[in-house]
Amino acid sequence: MQTQQLEAFWMPFTNNRAFKANPRILVAAKDMYYTSADGRQILDGTAGLWCVNAGHGRQKIVEAVQKQVAELDYAPPFRMGHPGSFELAERLIALFPEGFDRVFFGNSGSEAVESALKIAIAYHRVRGEASRTRLIGRERGYHGVGFGGISVGGMANNRKFFGSLLPGTDHLPHTHNLEKNAFSKGQPQWGAHLADELERMVKLHDPSTIAAVIVEPVAGSTGVLVPPMGYLERLRELCTQYGILLIFDEVITAFGRLGATCATEYFNVVPDLITMAKGITNATVPMGAVLTRKGIYDAFVAAASERAMELPHGYTYSGHPLACAAALATLDVYQEEGLFDRAKELAPYWQKCAHHLKDLPHVIDVRNIGLVAAVEFESIPDRIGDRGTFCLQRCFEKGLMVRATGDIIALSPPLIITKEQIDRLFAIFAETIQELP
């Protein structure tokens, strides 16, 4: 593509000048591979953007969307409905762990988070605890790009451009500690006590002001931060004790990434709300959703008059027919091919391959869980992120897509990956690490 054809699009989360000087353009995708503009096959080591869990161009999903757009392209979600959204909600409730009974649809992970935060605050209000408006996130957390998500998120560069954000938010400390937990396989042993910081916040702010705590069970976008043993259990215990809703942001961890339906199932810790997106439709059509535990919806109904809408919130495209069709077909593919179990079976081999990188130059940590891993490089003084950027570009040139967050490389392939493809992925990656500046 000519340079002038690239200028009109202001790309998200991208160094636009650097990209347009040396663009990485993808023109097709099938199964485990993208095709680049120059005709090369690029092994997808990131499932797109953590989202193409069943691999690219799956015929069952393609046909479902084609059929749906010809039959019913759009139905308003306000005071109207269509069969797909109700069917999908039932399927999700049946798939996820027991204890949840309602699904609220949006169009992305960001919208799912905004919806969950609003539901949490409104839930306390309809129950007569309107003072509970404070939201607590975590340092190095990522919860999308809405004002609510940025406010509870803990990535400084994502926050600093946008003013004071939502008032009254606070943040738990992150759990990443290289001195204690470097080269952990699965959950690290050290760090459960960091959940006790919630006790300090409760004393500082008073529990009657706190609506919800939101965390990613496994923090993805900030570099794959795996929760210490006992950490999530302690958060659940404290939230229950003080009447605070616990939200798990499972936009990345839902739909097989850990070798289970979701992190809630994997860790056996049940929150009050679960946000999801990405893998819900295999990224074919944008969709997000919030799963709420039993009793939350009922509180809204009990507080509203018979003629009133219970929750004044929603989106033009909530439960869009095409997204629902894609999601239903995606759930079929997951089930028919046993992809969550497949991820579980591959996880030990994936772990072994990832930790073989331990002694390569500049590698200061390798961490993993399920079919996700991160390799952290020692940063060049005053040039933080240079090694990560170099690695992303060189891997692409060699036929591998990785994701760089500063000097951390994250890997999260489609769940259809084979052992031979895992070998190729790590061979290219290891070769690239040897070339780091």
Image (cartoon, rainbow, N blue to C red):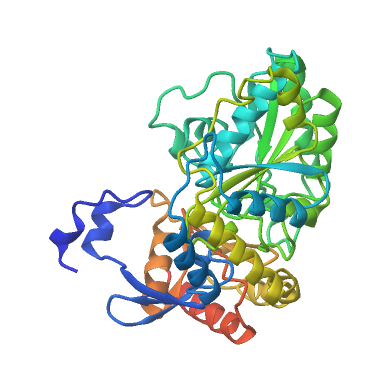
User: Which residue lies most toward the bottom here?
Assistant: 420
Image coords of residue 283 (percent x, y): 50, 60
Q: Residue at x 60, y 28 (%)?
A: 118
Q: Quadrant of residue 344?
A: bottom right
- Residue 46 in view here: no
* Location of residue 81 by image quarter: top right
Q: Is residue 381 visible?
A: yes
Counting from the top left corner in percent of width and height, residue 406 is at: 46, 53
- In depth, the one of 157 and 108 nearer the eye is 108
Residue sitting at 75 percent across and 57 percent down? 95
**Residue 242 horizontal side relative to residue 330, left or right:** right
Query: For this rendering, which residue is in front, 292 or 418?
Result: 292
Compared across the picture, whether 115 is left or right of 381 comes to right
Location of the C terminus (image quadrant): bottom left
- Give above or below for 70 relative to 360: above
Q: Nearer the viewer, residue 24 or 52?
A: 52
Q: Looking at the image, how many numbered discs can be counted on the residues?
A: 0
In percent of the image, x 36 and y 49: which residue is there?
12
On the image, the x and y values in percent for residue 156 come to 48, 36
x and y percentages locating residue 27 in the rendered image = 33, 72
Q: Is residue 94 above or below residue 63?
A: above
Q: From what the image shows, is residue 240 above or below residue 6?
A: above
Quadrant containing the N terminus in the rendered view: bottom left
Q: Residue at x 73, y 49 (%)?
A: 227
Residue 248, image quadrant: top right
